[in-house]
Amino acid sequence: MRLRRSLNLLLAVAVLAGAGAAWYAGQTPSGPAPLTAIEPRDVQTLELVFPRQDRSPLRLERRRDGWHFVEPIERPARDGRVVSALTVLVAPRRSCYPVAEHEPAEFGLNRPRLRMRADDTTVEFGDRAADGRRYVRAGDRFCLLPDQFWPLLKRGLDGLADPSVLGTGTAPRRIATPDAEARFGDADGGWTLTEGTGDAKAWAAHWRAARASGFILDPPAADLGRIRIATDNAILQWRVAAREPRLILVPTGADYGIAIPAAEAERLLAPPPAEADTGSS
């Protein structure tokens, strides 16, 4: 009887211990640790340096309305791309190796393609491995990660700065270029040309959708005329620094240029031809 009582006691203790272990396992994180200890949502400043290329370092800061470039130009960033790129900070740490036990040059980490500094945390991007993953270093370890972050960052300013010429969601109310001028708000509530010929409404649509293909840090000094666009809450102005082979606009007060492909340039400088009236008389 005493032996049975002891066995029952041992069994009860084992059951309780197993239940406790199961509860504890449910309270602790499972799976690989993250690449770094910083959460993307906590990052306030971001610096991007491309050691293998002759590019100016890029500096961004988080504001209430999203991410903004502060160096080498002042301009809103493509918020979604920056936020997605920052998730590398918490990428699962798999296939990792101590830097001290390997030669960084073999993985492109002695002179990385990109050095990303998020607040006080540095992540470096090296070469791509044969299986399509990329070598990424954080601290004293480097890991092989899916190559989904480098494509978001490799174009630097051209890929991360907001390409919208007028600003996302901004509609023009008055347009004046060296070639034409138009305004919104005639008796019919539509667009009217005051200088030049063509379709003023289509012209306004082209401006609303205009996107830069890149940014020029040292734009031409030429002044080929001025462009002035009034919106609901601002007046935007640019100097035309070049018209061929692409349109380069320099915002007033800025020292960089916005490059617009030649195919788009003509549709911005002057209204497109008005469609012929095909109605029957």
Image: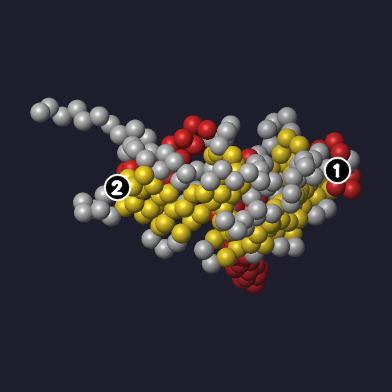
Residue 53, visible in the rendered structure: yes
Q: Viewer-nearest of labels 1 and 2?
A: 2
Q: Find residue 253 and report its horizontal and vertical position in percent.
A: 60, 58
Q: Nearer the viewer, residue 101 or 215?
A: 215
Horizontally, residue 232 falls left or right of residue 161, namely left
Q: Nearer the viewer, residue 213 or 202?
A: 202
Crowd around label 2: few <14 · some 14–19 · many ≥20 (10 Å): some
Q: Given the image, on which type of amino acid does mark 2 rest?
A: Thr
Please report the residue visible at 59 percent of the width from the left and 46 percent of the height from the top: 223
Q: Nearer the viewer, residue 30 or 206?
A: 206
Q: Which mark is residue 192?
A: 2
* Residue at mark 1 to residue at mark 2: CA–CA distance: 60 Å
Residue on which disc 1 sits: 110
Name the residue at the front extreme.
195
The quadrant in which residue 30 appears is bottom right
Q: Earlier in the sequence, mark 1 or mark 2?
A: 1
Please report the residue visible at 89 percent of the width from the left and 45 percent of the height from the top: 101
- Location of the N terminus by quadrant is bottom right
Name the residue at the left extreme.
281
Give the colouring mode of the picture: secondary structure
Q: Find residue 117 and report its horizontal and vertical position in percent.
A: 73, 56
Horizontally, residue 177 falls left or right of residue 6, namely left
- Location of the C terminus by quadrant is top left
Secondary structure category for the residue under label 1: loop
Residue 91, visible in the rendered structure: no
